[in-house]
Amino acid sequence: MRKLCSLVAVLTGASLAGASLAGCMTPPTPAERVTDAAMALNIAARFNQLDVAVGHTSKAARPDFMKHHAAWGQSLRIVDVEMASLSLPDSDRAVVLVDYAWIRNNEGTMRATRVEQTWKDDAGWHLVREQRVAGDIGLLGEPVPEAPPAGPDKQFATRTIHEDGAAVTE
């Protein structure tokens, strides 16, 4: 019986110590909170859940965000998204660099674009602006220059010399 009472006392003491330590947890830092918000927005956008992603944008930025991401899941597909860097120039402003790998649905070329996202802490972190800073054009709805039409598929051009001496390259 005495061993049982000792065991109960030890377990009770351990649970009280655990409960008191749980009360000492520090709140997340601004960097942790903006990282969580940026990851939530970019993962939702990657999987074409724009209704979820737009919830992480400021009200003023929502029309531009929807316009810039209109082709996502329609004429282009996001293959991968990765946060490249995070900086906090001010306690309520953050700049996040995000790398996207993507493909246009009508071609098979993997493309890569780096986007700079500006975030503001206004009762929670919200995206206020994003712009392409490097890589392929077209991810954020920019006009894409027309590709030149593909010529005939030839490995080596052939030169034919006719009986009359005229030469033709095919």
Image (spheres, rainbow, N blue to C red):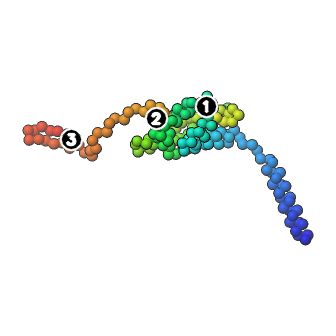
> Could you tell me which quadrant the C terminus lies in?
top left
Mark 3 vs mark 1, CA separation in Å = 55 Å
Q: Which residue is drawn at 51% across and 41% down?
A: 100
The answer to which quarter of the image holds residue 124 is top right
Kindly give the residue lying farthest to the left in the view shown.
164
Q: Which of 27 and 56 is in front in this view?
A: 56
Return the residue at label 2. Answer: 137
Badge 2, how many Cα within 10 Å: few under 14, some, many 20+?
Answer: some
Q: Position of residue 161 (x, y in %)?
A: 13, 41
Is residue 133 shown to the viewer in this render? Answer: no
Q: Residue 45 carries which label?
A: none
Mark 2 vs mark 1, CA separation in Å = 21 Å
Q: Where is residue 3 in the image (x, y as percent from the top left)?
A: 88, 69
The answer to whether 120 is drawn above or below residue 170 in the figure is above
Q: Nearer the viewer, residue 67 or 167?
A: 67
Mark 3 vs mark 2, CA separation in Å = 34 Å
Lateral position of residue 20 relative to residue 62, left or right: right
Q: Where is residue 32 in the image (x, y as percent from the top left)?
A: 67, 42
Lateral position of residue 74 relative to residue 157, left or right: right
Instruction: Please tell me how many numbered marks the rendered image carries.
Output: 3
Q: Say what amino acid the circle numbered 3 marks.
A: Glu
The answer to whether 128 is drawn above or below residue 84 in the figure is above
The answer to whether mark 3 and mark 1 are in CB contact below 8 A is no
